[in-house]
Amino acid sequence: MSKISLPLISFPHPQIAGFILFFIAGFADGLMVPFFPLWAQHSAAIPIGLIGFLFGCYAGGELIAAPFIGGIADRIGRRPVLIGSASGIGLGFIALFFTHGVVETACVLVIIGIFESVLHPTIYTLIADVTPEAEHRNQFSKARVFACAGGIAGPLLGALIVQSNLGYVFLASGISMLCGGVMLVILLPETRQQLADEDAEDEEGFSALMPAFRDRRLAALLIWALLLGVAGSWVEAVMPLYAHNQLGISSTNVGFLFTLGAVLNTLGQLTLTRMLALRSPMFIILSAGATLILAFAGLLIFSHLFSLIVAVCFYSLSQMMVGPLMPAAVNQLAPVRLRATYMAALSVVSDLRDSVGPATGTALFAVTFTLPWMIGIPIVAMAALGLGISLSSNNRSSSQTPE
């Protein structure tokens, strides 16, 4: 192994570096995303109608790049990919501070999305590399806690920074990601296992980068997960409009509602994961689906602030159940040499959810404000049942496979 691939300090727990990077990424997004529309309108003179397009460029960069480079860490290693990703995102955020106009901003956001497309799947892969399989769900729960904590800290600091200059949030986000890159250089060893068959012919080409096309078990898992995620995302996408238009709740109070959800995720994730440690994947997924259905039912039946609070709590509870389970299930299916590639497939589903979910949810809301919740209930029921059956089937197959 060359010296350039070695950390400056021998660090015995590489997964901790992954947790810290999750916090930094959540912190940087929390600094930038809530204040981006204000910056675009007041500092960059971008028309309001194009701000949504720019957010689409950010998600689009991830969605376009993930199928092609999402599994690159299986070929060149986890360490260089994470260092390059963190540094590229950081430089992209800083570039936003100096950007003017729609075209320039869109190009920078697409580039940031490309670098970000490999960040989360590679961190999950790093954690899976260095921890026992029995611990994966708990380890991925810790990763979610760090990401949620960063998502709380970022907007709080951003609210202070924007009092001086809206664009300073980009500088702060970029510097934090660059600091994350420096941390990786200092602490992170390479965790990718060198295998004798890693250069096998079947690992080349687009099909190797999108294993869902050749692994039917993974494909079934991801399809149901996408359907459940799209319906669940309607809470985040539609509820602010519902709260403001139907209940007259201010934007500030809507922000407090989602802050409550982030706090619940941060404080409750590990406790809930321990409580469900001995439960089957079917039980967990069906419980998550039932919880989300209760959130939809409350929004459908009651038009009151209390129903919004309950819906946010139930939605957060559902996310805490599903969040750690999915990367653990995908990693269980993945051959060792293709761990990052399989995680990249899960990342594509996440990007699709973030793109398709808000678009479909707001389109349904435009027809009538109760339609997302009416349609969401049967979709969640079907998706949760399908996902639960897929997870149970995969568990049985794994237990019957000889070691």
Image: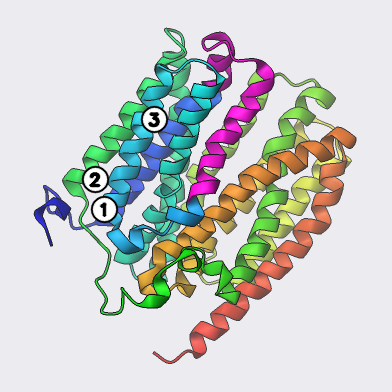
Q: Earlier in the sequence, mark 3 or mark 2?
A: 3
For the C terminus, which image quadrant? bottom left
**Residue at the (69%, 45%) spot, across then down:** 357
**Which corner quadrant of the image does residue 99 belong to?**
top left
Instruction: Examine the rendering and report whether any part of residue 272 can be seen.
Output: no
Which is more toward the observer, 281 or 276? 281
Magenta: main secondary structure: helix
Check disc 2 and report the residue beneath it. Answer: 184
**Residue at the (61%, 77%) spot, across then down:** 392
166 vs 86: above or below = above
**Mark 2 surroundings within 10 Å by alpha-carbon count, few (fewer than 14), some (14 through 19), many (20 or more):** many
Q: CA distance from mark 3 to mark 1?
A: 20 Å
Disc 3 residue type (three-letter):
Gly
Disc 1 residue type (three-letter):
Arg
44 vs 113: above or below = above
The x and y percentages for residue 267 are 49, 44
For the N terminus, which image quadrant? bottom left
**Which corner quadrant of the image does residue 348 belong to?**
bottom right
Residue 64 highlighted magenta (yes or no): yes
The x and y percentages for residue 257 are 64, 31
**Residue at the (57%, 10%) spot, across then down:** 45
Which region shows up in magenta? 36-65
Check disc 1 and report the residue beneath it. Answer: 79
Check disc 3 and report the residue beneath it. Answer: 92
The x and y percentages for residue 19 are 35, 48
Q: Are marks 2 and 1 in contact (CB under 8 Å)?
A: yes
Q: CA distance from mark 3 to mark 2?
A: 18 Å
